[in-house]
Amino acid sequence: MKSLPSEIAMESLEFLSLSQCVNLKKIPEFVGDVKYLSRLILSETAIKEIPPSVGCLIGLVELHLDGCRSLLCVPSVISNCKSLKLLNMLGCSKLSKLFESLGVMDCLEELDLSRTALKELPSSLVHLKNLKKLSVSGSPASWYTFGIFKRRIPHSLGCSVFSSSKGLCALKVLDLRDLNLCEGAVPEDIGYFGNNFVTLPESIRRLSKLSVLYLENCKSLRQLSVLPLNGTLYVFTYDSTSLSMLSVPPPKLGLYANLLEFSFRCC
């Protein structure tokens, strides 16, 4: 399918999927009161832009744009979708900028920006108080500075630190794989993990809602000394070839009765 009518006026429409319509370059404007549309799936289409009328979809809960490799921008009117919980832009390889008003989307729970061309994240991102999962993995080599990051080593590509993450109070999963982050790139007020870290920061124990910890391809990670004391916790350590020590004293191992799975592979 290469084209659709220029307008959609279906007031009872609840679900629209155009997934894998690889020749579709433009989607219709939404006219009228399309208040029941909750899922819009545009994955792997050839669209270059999103019509502004998407901002009128007050009932939209999920917007899937993953694999839209021609997508150049996402309009700021998306922030008017107050019910939106999932925004998936994985693999939008030409998307280089994100709207600053992202932070007003109070219902947003999952945001995937992996493998995009973004060079900055909007500073308002830290105001997403209900965000549970943030994925920014696999960004290009030129991605070295972020709106919520600050550069610590100006001449070292990829060595950045969070300025603050205190607003992301509901965050459970943070995917930073393949960002080329270095030791010290994650500060004490978030206590998470990255690519070239030697150790995890002490403050990781304060992530009370963390349920899954992935330490994949952390080639410089040498030891695990502290872990969050949460209700349930899964720890997966893959291909961290420098890891040689689990330095938790035996008397304290009993504190980690919450561990449901501890997996080491290729370590």
Image (cartoon, rainbow, N blue to C red):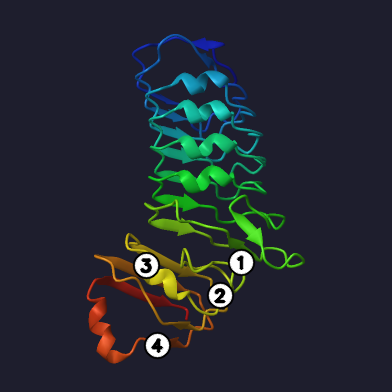
* Mark sitting earlier along the chain (2/3): 2
Q: Quick check: can you spot residue 83?
A: yes
- x and y, in percent, of residue 261 in the image: 29, 71
Q: Are marks 2 and 4 in contact (CB under 8 Å)?
A: no
- x and y, in percent, of residue 264 in the image: 40, 77
Q: Are marks 1 and 2 in contact (CB under 8 Å)?
A: yes
Helix, strand or loop for disc 1: loop
Q: Residue at x 50, y 75 (%)?
A: 239
Q: Nearer the viewer, residue 25 or 96?
A: 96
Q: Residue at x 60, y 41 (%)?
A: 92
Left or right: residue 260 compared with residue 134: left
Left or right: residue 165 compared with residue 132: right
What's the residue type where badge 4 is placed?
A: Ser
* Mark sitting earlier along the chain (1/4): 1
Residue corresponding to mark 3: 206
Foreground disc of the pair 1, 3: 3
Helix, strand or loop for disc 4: loop
Residue corresponding to mark 2: 197
- x and y, in percent, of residue 115 in the image: 59, 50
- x and y, in percent, of residue 169 in the image: 39, 53
What's the residue type where badge 2 is placed?
A: Phe
Q: Is residue 40 above or below residue 135?
A: above
- Please identify the quarter of the rendering in which residue 3 is found: top right
Q: Residue at x 41, y 47 (%)?
A: 131
- Please identify the quarter of the rendering in which residue 26 is found: top right
What's the residue type where badge 1 is placed?
A: Leu
Residue corresponding to mark 4: 247
* Mark sitting earlier along the chain (3/4): 3
Q: Quick check: can you spot residue 18?
A: no
What's the residue type where badge 3 is placed?
A: Arg
Left or right: residue 69 compared with residue 259: right
Residue corresponding to mark 1: 181
